[in-house]
Amino acid sequence: MVDVMPRDEQERLLARMEGFPLHQRLGFELIDARDGTARARVAVGPDVLNAGGVLHGGVLYAVLDITAFCAAVTAVPSNTNAATHDLHVSVLRASPPGAVLELSAQVQKTGKRLLFVDAEARIDGVLVALARVTKSLIPFPTQG
């Protein structure tokens, strides 16, 4: 069993996530993250569409990865970063403009050096994409 970072430390890190310019640009909104899970949402607006007029695949991959990170934060030890090691996404259907992506992620396993997260995106309850995310657990450098 991993000794996870204290809840107040998790909340500080998660609050910083919402302030990142990329996350704001993508419209990422964290709903909740605790106990190895995370829920978020993203509105599919005109700034994130591809040439075909639907959500750009790279944006979908990014918001699934961000949601996976938020779940990982609640399952790692203090002073540990969870950096993306591998990301595999299966897109099942297009996400049209005006839709709201409902994102969720669940930590499946935490090891000494790796953490595995499954994530998904839904629109109105219909599955849009599945992701398997592997995170490398890296200690933050000590200050001193």
Image: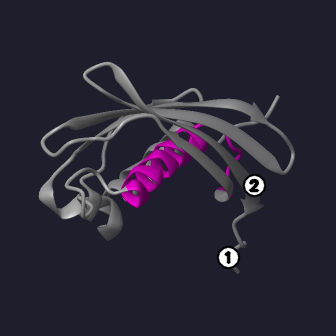
Quarter of the image that includes the C terminus: bottom right
The residue sitting at 23% across, 58% down in the picture is 49
Residue 6 visible in the picture? yes
Quarter of the image that includes the N terminus: top right
Q: For residue 56: magenta? A: no
Asked which secondary structure carries label 1, the reply is loop
Q: Viewed as shown, does residue 42 lie left or right of 70? A: left
Question: From the viewer's perspective, is residue 3 above or below residue 16?
Answer: above
Q: Which mark is residue 15?
A: none
The residue sitting at 79% across, 35% down in the picture is 2
Residue occupied by mark 2: 137
Task: Return the x and y of residue 42 as percentages of the image width and height.
Answer: 27, 44
Asked which secondary structure carries label 2, the reply is strand
Which of the pair 124/106 is nearer the observer?
124
Question: From the viewer's perspective, is residue 30 above or below residue 54?
Answer: above
- The residue sitting at the bottom extreme is 144
Residue occupied by mark 1: 143
- The residue sitting at the front extreme is 52
**Mark toward the viewer: 2 or 1:** 2
Q: Are marks 2 and 1 in contact (CB under 8 Å)?
A: no
The residue sitting at 31% across, 61% down in the picture is 19
Which of the pair 79/26 is nearer the observer?
26
Question: From the viewer's perspective, is residue 28 above or below residue 116?
Answer: below
Task: Return the x and y of residue 89 as percentages of the image width and height.
Answer: 56, 45
Q: Viewed as shown, does residue 1 lie left or right of 39? A: right
Task: Return the x and y of residue 62 as percentages of the image width and height.
Answer: 45, 56
The magenta region covers 57-81
Say which amino acid is labelled 1: Gln
Labels 2 and 1: the sequence-earlier one: 2
For the residues labelled 2 and 1, the Cα–Cα distance comes to: 18 Å
Say which amino acid is labelled 2: Leu
